[in-house]
Image (cartoon, helix red, strand yellow):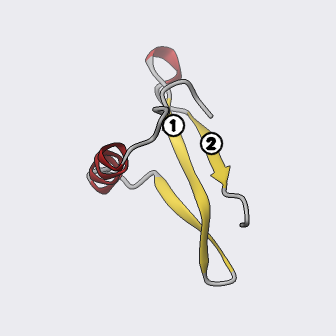
Amino acid sequence: MRDIFPHPYTLKDALQFIDIISAEDPQLTFAIEYNGHFAGMISLIKQPDVYRKSAKPGFWIGERK
């Protein structure tokens, strides 16, 4: 996980994250689905300055419990 990810992760953090990705234009964050269930997320992270026309992929996959 990137350092920007809050720990502990609270309900307030989750709601704030949903607000942020809901406002993306264009949409850069997407759910990963496996067998009809939410399994993780993938996003493109825009880069600054001279790299402004590029993006890095970021993702996470949850653990099965």
Would you place residue 5 above or below residue 19 in this image?
above
Residue at position x 46%, y 32% in the image: 6
Would you place residue 51 above or below residue 46 in this image?
above
- The answer to whether 55 appears left or right of 19 in the picture is right
SS at mark 2 in the image: strand
Q: Residue farthest to the top?
A: 49
Task: Locate residue 39, reporting x and y percent.
Answer: 63, 66
Q: Are marks 2 and 1 in contact (CB under 8 Å)?
A: yes
Task: Locate residue 18, reporting x and y percent.
Answer: 33, 54
Residue under pointer 2: 57
Would you place residue 49 above or below residue 13 in this image?
above
Q: Quadrant of the N terminus?
A: top right
Q: Residues within 10 Å of mark 2 (few under 14, many from 20)?
A: few
Distance (Cα) linking label 2 and label 1: 6 Å
Q: Quadrant of the C terminus?
A: bottom right
Q: Quadrant of residue 22?
A: bottom left
Q: Amino acid at mark 2?
A: Pro
Task: Locate residue 32, reporting x and y percent.
Answer: 61, 65
Task: Locate residue 23, reporting x and y percent.
Answer: 26, 52
Residue under pointer 1: 45
- The answer to whether 50 appears left or right of 10 in the picture is right
Q: Amino acid at mark 1?
A: Ile
- The answer to whether 2 appears left or right of 35 in the picture is left
Q: Residue farthest to the bottom?
A: 36
